[in-house]
Amino acid sequence: MSPGLHTIPARGGMAARVAKDQAVQIVNTHGQQVVDTWAFAADDPVEFMSMEHSRAAFRKAIPEIGDAYVTNRRRPILTIVGDSSPGVHDTLIAACDPHRYEQLGHEGYHENCTENLHAALDALDVKAPETPCPLNLFMNIAILEAGKLDWRPPVSRPGDAISLRAEMDCIVVFSACPMDLLPINGQDGEPTEAHFRVLD
Amino acid sequence: MSPGLHTIPARGGMAARVAKDQAVQIVNTHGQQVVDTWAFAADDPVEFMSMEHSRAAFRKAIPEIGDAYVTNRRRPILTIVGDSSPGVHDTLIAACDPHRYEQLGHEGYHENCTENLHAALDALDVKAPETPCPLNLFMNIAILEAGKLDWRPPVSRPGDAISLRAEMDCIVVFSACPMDLLPINGQDGEPTEAHFRVLD
């Protein structure tokens, strides 16, 4: 991956190879965009970042700076090394998919994070064995009393960024979530582009 | 599956075929046993009960009577139709596996829910495409302030039971969690058997 800023197109996905000890910084360029994020081990994508294993590792629903996401083999893969946003991200909710939009009443094709994941990997000639639960950067799912969940607009601001250090050679995938039927990408329901850079 | 009570052996797993509209009742016989639970579509196990899709469907971290778990294709698969326990179950934490016991300092082989899942399916000549995040019945993972998680003993009592109605023909799998290094199966750390029955 060349240095410099790469665009995650609005409603679209992007994948990048990141070497161990490099960091990837994801920028919420316009401030209200959720970025679904996955990571797969470069030498064997059957091993991937797993939200259910990570929550057991850091004992939190939402991790903080210094916490490491782990794989389905419980090895650290991405550590949060910086976060200029208020730190509100989500580990609980599946990526959107054609079924989701159909159930919300949309007719016809709709871009979705699940297909963005697999298309972005196709571009690198990599095949994911499944669709893991994503790390939903900047997504604001409030955990209320009795475990009730509430879908809310992001609390991040334009230019807020989170940096994740790779603990192994891996392939990271981002999808600028195309959800426009719920206010998860801001009250105006308008998905936007986001950006990322890989740092040595 | 014959009617009557079936034993999920302590530290072991069991799978059963359940027809649409039948219910499966899981009994916490001794009161302090976590039962990891999965469900796969009978005609195509690539479709299975998914915690991350279910949380989006019922908008809760922990569902209640009347809520339906859905599959990774967002179709209802198991609905909670009865629960005589205090209703404390977990949808957040991965099944234990050999890596988990190794990281907790155990040396040598240890029974685990992940291998129990696949062995129980093998007995029915079914192959799971992956290891989905389980529904951890009776498991007490408290969600504290700021999303911090705490591993606690079950609050269920001997004989407490939960009933799940099948919304499609499916294969359900149970593992009586063999964790004995954390007090998740009670303060005495002694995994026990549990039971289930299939009801027309």
Image (spheres, coloured by chain):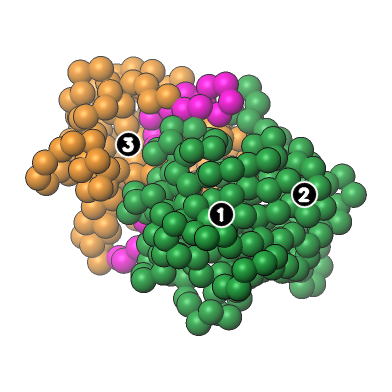
Chain colours: A orange, B green
CA distance separating discs 3 and 2? 45 Å
Q: Furthest-front residue in view?
A: B200
Q: Is residue A169 visible?
A: no
Disc 3 versus disc 2: nearer the observer: 2
Query: How many neighbours does mark 1 have within 10 angstroms: few (below 14), some (14-19), or many (20 or more)?
Result: many
Q: Is residue B188 visible?
A: yes
Q: Give me the residue at 38% from left, 66% from top.
A: B46
Q: What kind of residue is marked 2?
A: Gly
Query: How many neighbours does mark 3 have within 10 angstroms: few (below 14), some (14-19), or many (20 or more)?
Result: many
Q: Position of residue A116 (x, y in %)?
A: 23, 50
Query: Residue A35: which numbered mark, if any?
Result: 3
The subunit carrying tag 1 is B
Q: Position of residue B30 (x, y in %)?
A: 82, 53
Q: Give me the residue at 28% from left, 23% from top.
A: A183
Secondary structure under badge 2?
A: loop
Which residue corresponds to mark 2?
A: B159
Is the residue at mark 2 from the same chain as the one at mark 1?
yes
Query: How many neighbours does mark 2 have within 10 angstroms: few (below 14), some (14-19), or many (20 or more)?
Result: some
The relative height of residue A46 versus residue A165 in the rendered view (above or below) is below
Q: Give me the residue at 76% from left, 38% from top.
A: B155
In the foreground, A166 or A61:
A61
Secondary structure under badge 3?
A: strand
Q: Which residues are magenta?
A: A126-149
Contact between labelled residues 3 and 1, with CB atoms less than 8 Å apart: no
Query: Residue B134: which numbered mark, if any?
Result: 1
Asked if residue A130 is among those painted magenta in the image, a careful observer would answer yes
